[in-house]
Amino acid sequence: MTGTVARSGLREGVRHRALLVALLLMALQLGSLAVPAYACGCGAMVPSRGSGMRVDEERSVVHWDGRTEQIVMSLTVDGDAPEAAWIMPVPGRATVELGDRALFDELDTLTAPEHRDRPYFWPRDDDWPFAGGESDGAGAPRAGAGGVGVVGRERLGPFDVARLTATDPKALRGWLERNGFELPDALAAELRPYVKQKWEYVAVRLAPEDAEDAALRGTLDPLRMRFPSTELVYPMRLSRLADTPQSLGLYVLAAHRMEPRTAIGGLEPEVLFAGKVEGEGPVGDLTGGDGAFLTAVDQSFPQPERITGDHRFRPAEADTAFRKVVYDPVLWTAGGVPVWLMTFGVPLLVLVVAALLVVRVRGRRPVTPPPPVYVPPPLS
């Protein structure tokens, strides 16, 4: 009887495991059929059918002279998608060209924080005598009516760029499908406000230049877009589609220090740098050789679904310069000698030496022999 019960329990366990495996396989099969849209801070990425892609980093530079706006974007992507489409809404007719990778290097240098030493008194784990040497001082340390009109199309490096006008998201969906991509319903819904505002789109087909490449990976060449705009606007609405927290790192070049009008559903924007920069190098090429006021802004969006719209910037009350300061902990020294050692080590050393001298002096003194012991004579 016991053997029968054991075999019955074993068969029941095998059935449960088989059912679990079947459910997992079904979930994987359904997941492989989905074609998600990956939101960026500025635009949305749609991978080719049956593939996946993620945007690991997005960096953007915006220049605005009061009439024309330029956006330079650099994306770092990963996944197994051999091709992808990137959709960017813009308020006016846009021109597109390849950007300069060195632009971001120059801006990183211009906005680098100032490092200052912050001395500390007591030695730490990395200091002598715990680690055998002093600290090195290193701190701890982004159309025609009812359809789509293609107003321009060009090949730029690995990009097939189409500039579109659209009055209907369904027409945009049709264009994407004809080019091998599917427009998710959620993305189509988020595009409707742009259609109502009569905005246009930059649709970019990303594909490796080398046909043997299996997937799009790494940092792509930056794209530089230019379009007319009477205000400085940075499209963010499509980031509502992201299912993970988003962050925005943005360099803003304009005549004055600029600030977002609202937080648009994210945390309060943080200014990392503000100051006048000269028109040299790639920055000068972007600004036309004129100087500009550079504002570097960083913002986090822990809950992207709360994003309420696009970032719209306005001049700040004053062109107040600002540079972030990073304090690097360094051991407090004087003449290369740790102060703690001079404060406590030297006096302690003096006491030890004095004690040794006392012992040595005492050791050299002549020893006085004890007085003779009186021994009475024997009794007769």
Image (cartoon, rainbow, N blue to C red):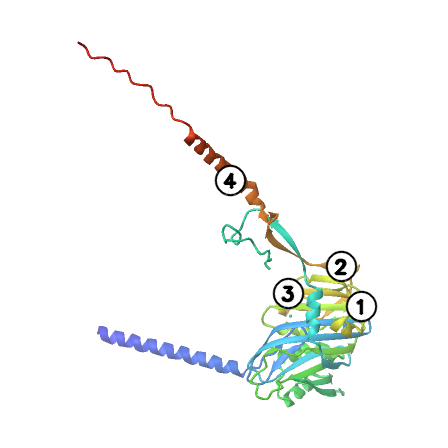
Mark 3 crowdedness (10 Å alpha carbons): few <14, some 14-19, many ≥20: some
Whole-angstrom CA distance, mark 3 to mark 2, is: 23 Å
In the rendered view, would you say 171 is above or below 56?
below
The tag earlier along the polypeptide, 3 or 4, is 3
| Quarter of the figure with residue 280 | bottom right
* Disc number placed over residue 349 in the picture, else none: 4
- Identify which residue is drawn at 53% across, 83% down: 33
Please state which of residues 93 and 207 is positioned toward the viewer in this rendering: 207
- Evaluate if marks 4 and 1 touch, with contact meaning CB atoms under 8 Å apart: no
Q: Please state which amino acid type lies under the numbered disc 3.
A: Ser
Whole-angstrom CA distance, mark 3 to mark 1, is: 29 Å
The tag earlier along the polypeptide, 3 or 2, is 3
Measured as percent of width and height from the top left, residue 295 is found at: 74, 65
Q: Please state which amino acid type lies under the numbered disc 2.
A: Ala
Q: Secondary structure at mark 4?
A: helix
Q: Secondary structure at mark 2?
A: loop
- Identify which residue is drawn at 42% across, 31% down: 364
Q: Between tags 3 and 4, which lies in front?
A: 4
* Disc number placed over residue 321 in the picture, else none: 2
Which residue reaches farthest top?
A: 380
Q: Between tags 3 and 1, which lies in front?
A: 1
**Residue behind mark 3:** 300
Whole-angstrom CA distance, mark 4 to mark 1, is: 61 Å
Please state which of residues 100 and 127 is positioned toward the viewer in this rendering: 127
* Disc number placed over residue 356 in the picture, else none: none
